[in-house]
Amino acid sequence: MLAKLQQIWKAKDIRNKILYVLLLLVIFRVAAHIPVPGINVGDLRSYFENNQVLGLLNLFSGGAMQNFSIVMLGVGPYITASIIFQLLVMIVPKLEALQKEGEYGRQKINQWTRMLTVPLAFIQGYAFVRLLSSQTGGRFLGDITILQMVTTLVIVTAGTIFLMWLGELITEKQIGNGISLLIFAGIVARLPQSLLNTVAAFDQSMVLNLLIFVVIALITIAVIVLITEGTRNIPVSYARHVVGQKSVGGVKTHLPLRVNQAGVIPIIFAISVILVQPMIAEFFLRSDVSWVASLANWTKNIFQDQSFYAAIYFLMVFFFTYFYTSVIFKPQQISENLQKQGGFIPGIRPGRHTSDYLNTVMNRIILAGALFLGLIAVLPIVVAPITGIQTLSIGGTSLLITVAVVIETVKQIDAQLVMRDYEGF
């Protein structure tokens, strides 16, 4: 480990890239503590800590939302825009053809994604302000005029665009994915405060609970690494054929199918759907129609029930894991590509039979991935009563993102080190 760090530090270009990325992450954390003018943020943090739904939103903003900072929306609108275009590419033939055009197509889709981020940030900012205002009775926001509302929305939208720009600058340095690293920085930045709160509230009766907490955390991290890196290798053989006087082909390799094919996207989808229900209910609590107000109040109360919340959250993550995997995993396309390249799966006929086989295998292994993501999503709700520690919590989603970002970043740095050795630097 120390030898690897020394090797990284001695490589001047890699060292400069890492320092540059760290500087941009520091700028992000500074911006996360600059509040929007005219907002009372005195008791806002404690309110977020006691609200499960807003706490999830705060996670993806890197803690900036509870400060009502200029970057309080985080990179959420950009992620939403990216997901929308990922789905559109799968169902719109023209976009799919554009993506296959190489670098030009990807740049065009990236440009449209950035453009879609602006209205999404504006809409999300307005929805959040209205939601927070209705839930707190104006305690934090007060009476906002139209001018103040527009000013606030312009500021937070600009903040999202600023973070999107920082993310792209980080990505260009090839030291991990920029957007993922921004979310990672927000998650890690909350850890010191949690540790300080735990130390301040510590007494001898908490020793056993802390040990249980540490054991559960270590097991969770190990399982996340195992599932994240887990693959089912499908053997693939390429037929031998003669080109001129040379014999080519006859190679045996494998096709890796990831257990967690969908990544963290199903959790984001589930959060979005779950947030919509209480958010809509808030707008109808004061309805003049009695049954509408009663339904809105029932919806709000039932989503505050931890058991119901955990159950519906788990089921939504489970469903979206299968849904998103079916969108991004195309067994028919893989089968066609193998057939064109002269490849085949031993014992399986090319064409439709290969496609059916891949689809069957994926449906089986994705069950483990869906159960894993569902359990990870509800982990904080399950672990909190076991440990009894309120100042520390095992956020499954946080750990999943953190582990995935660390693994990806380490792989990219290793790839650059290997490239340096290959080029003889």
Image: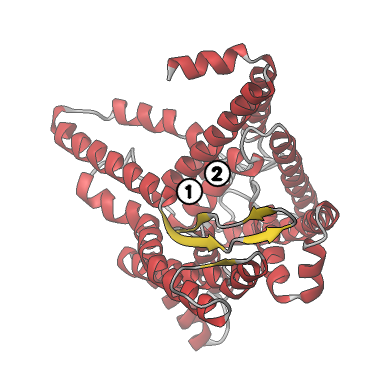
In this view, 69 is above or below 325:
above
Q: Quarter of the image holding residue 213? A: top left
Tell me residue 347's x, y (percent). 43, 73
Residue 118 % position (x, y)? 79, 55
Residue type at mark 1: give it.
Answer: Phe
Task: Give me the disc on residue 235.
Answer: none
Q: Is residue 20 above or below residue 302?
A: above
Where residue 389 sits in the image (x, y, percent)? 26, 41
Query: Upstream in the sequence, badge 2 or badge 1?
Result: 1
Q: Nearer the viewer, residue 144 or 25?
A: 25
Q: Which residue is mark 1?
A: 48
| SS at mark 2 in the image | loop
Foreground residue, 360 or 21? Answer: 360
Residue furthest to the front in view is: 245
**Residue 382 is at least partly visible in this image:** yes
Camera-side residue: 68 or 217? 217
Residue in view at x 50 percent, y 60 percent? 261
Task: State the quadrant of the N terminus.
Answer: top left
Tag 2 near tag 1, CB within 8 Å: yes
Q: Is residue 323 above or below residue 225?
A: below
> Would you say 222 lies left or right of 19 here?
left
- How far is disc 2 from disc 1 in space, using C-alphas? 6 Å
Residue identified by numbered label 2: 66
Q: Would you say residue 393 is visible in this rendering?
A: no
x, y percent for residue 361: 42, 71
Q: Residues within 10 Å of mark 2 (few under 14, many from 20)?
A: many
- Which corner quadrant of the image does residue 120 belong to? bottom right
Rendered residue at 67%/23% (across/down):
23
The amino acid on which the numbered mark 2 sits, given as a three-letter code, is Gln
Report the quarter where the C terminus lies: top right
